[in-house]
Image: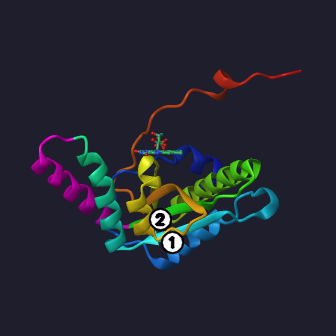
């Protein structure tokens, strides 16, 4: 598949088959991420590849946050268990963190570079017959989630990425053409 077809075909994958994702495949994806453009070559990305136990614990941390919004304690417990099990059963999951520079300009550049890396990773995954789903949210700064990942001070998680063989390839939401957002300035 050429790169334009690949870009157009990429969709967030929410359901994966049981096909495992090998360490070698994950390493290929992370090496693709590391090829992203990166001003000042700060190489700000840090990857935490979560195994089943860590995925379960990350899911538990997320489940606890969801359970806070539920009045019935039993229903809350069930949600925590379900979210933990769903995460554990993922074929692969990577938390992407960035180093937090004291200079705000570099912080912004580094954040942008990390997401260019994530896009590289997503497109590289497609070339291996895999799919990805990027996840963000307040969980990323939750001390429980940071602890599960083993994040040191001076780094913050910017996304987690679920990876696996797509069970179905969704159509995904249609996008408006670029003409809707483009001004040609003479
Ligand atoms: C920065 C970023 C954060 C995202 N966070 C979430 C998320 O927390 N939960 C989620 O279900 N999808 C998340 N997504 C996926 C988007 O919802 C998805 O890309 C969007 O619905 C368009 O669908 P598509 O990727 O299939 O084209 C995120 C995507 C990006 C780029």
Residue occupying image coordinates x 61% and y 60%: 98
User: Are there few (<14), some (14-19), or many (20+) residues within 10 Å of tag 2?
Assistant: many
Q: Alpha-carbon distance for marks 2 and 1?
A: 9 Å
Pick the quarter of the image with the C terminus.
Answer: top right
Mark 1 element type: helix
Answer yes or no: do the residues labelled 2 and 1 have beta carbons within 8 Å? yes
Q: Is residue 36 left or right of residue 5?
A: right
Q: Which mark is residue 94?
A: 2
User: Does the magenta run of residues contain 53?
Assistant: no
Where in the figure is residue 128, as x and y percent of width and height?
51, 66
In this rendered view, identify the residue nearer to me: 139 or 164: 139
Q: Main secondary structure of the magenta part?
A: helix
Question: Is 84 left or right of 96, judged from the image as shown?
Answer: left
For discs 2 and 1, the disc positioned in front in the rendered view: 2
Where residue 120 sits, quadrant-wise, is bottom right
Looking at the picture, the colour scheme in use is: rainbow
- The local crowd at label 1, few if under 14, some if 14 to 19, many if 20 or more residues have their Cα within 10 Å, is some
Q: Which residue is mark 1?
A: 26
Residue with the most extreme right position: 186
Disc 2 Cβ-to-ligand 1 distance below 8 Å: no
Span of residues in magenta: 70-91
Is 34 displayed left or right of 91 in the figure? Answer: right
> Which residue is pictured at 60% across the width and 53% down the height?
119
- Secondary element at image label 2: strand
Q: Is residue 49 above or below residue 4?
A: below
Q: Is 73 part of what is drawn in magenta?
A: yes
């Amino acid at each position: 598949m050429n790169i334009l077809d690949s870009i157009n075909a990429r969709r967030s994958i929410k359901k994966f088959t049981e096909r495992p994702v090998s360490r070698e495949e994950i390493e290929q994806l992370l090496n693709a991420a590391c090829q992203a453009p990166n001003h000042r070559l700060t190489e700000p990305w840090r990857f935490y590849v979560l195994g089943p136990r860590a995925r379960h614990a990350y899911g538990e941390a997320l489940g606890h946050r969801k359970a806070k919004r539920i009045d019935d304690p039993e229903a809350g417990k069930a949600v925590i268990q379900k979210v933990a099990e769903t995460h554990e059963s993922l074929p692969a999951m990577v938390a992407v963190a960035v180093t937090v520079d004291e200079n705000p300009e570099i912080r912004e550049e580094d954040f942008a570079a990390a997401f260019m890396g994530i896009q590289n990773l997503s497109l590289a995954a497609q070339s291996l017959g895999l799919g990805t789903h990027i996840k963000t949210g307040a969980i990323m700064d939750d001390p429980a989630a940071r602890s599960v990942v083993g994040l040191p001070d001076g780094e913050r998680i910017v996304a987690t990425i679920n990876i696996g063989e797509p069970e179905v390839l969704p159509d995904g939401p249609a996008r408006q053409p670029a003409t809707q957002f483009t001004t040609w300035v003479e």
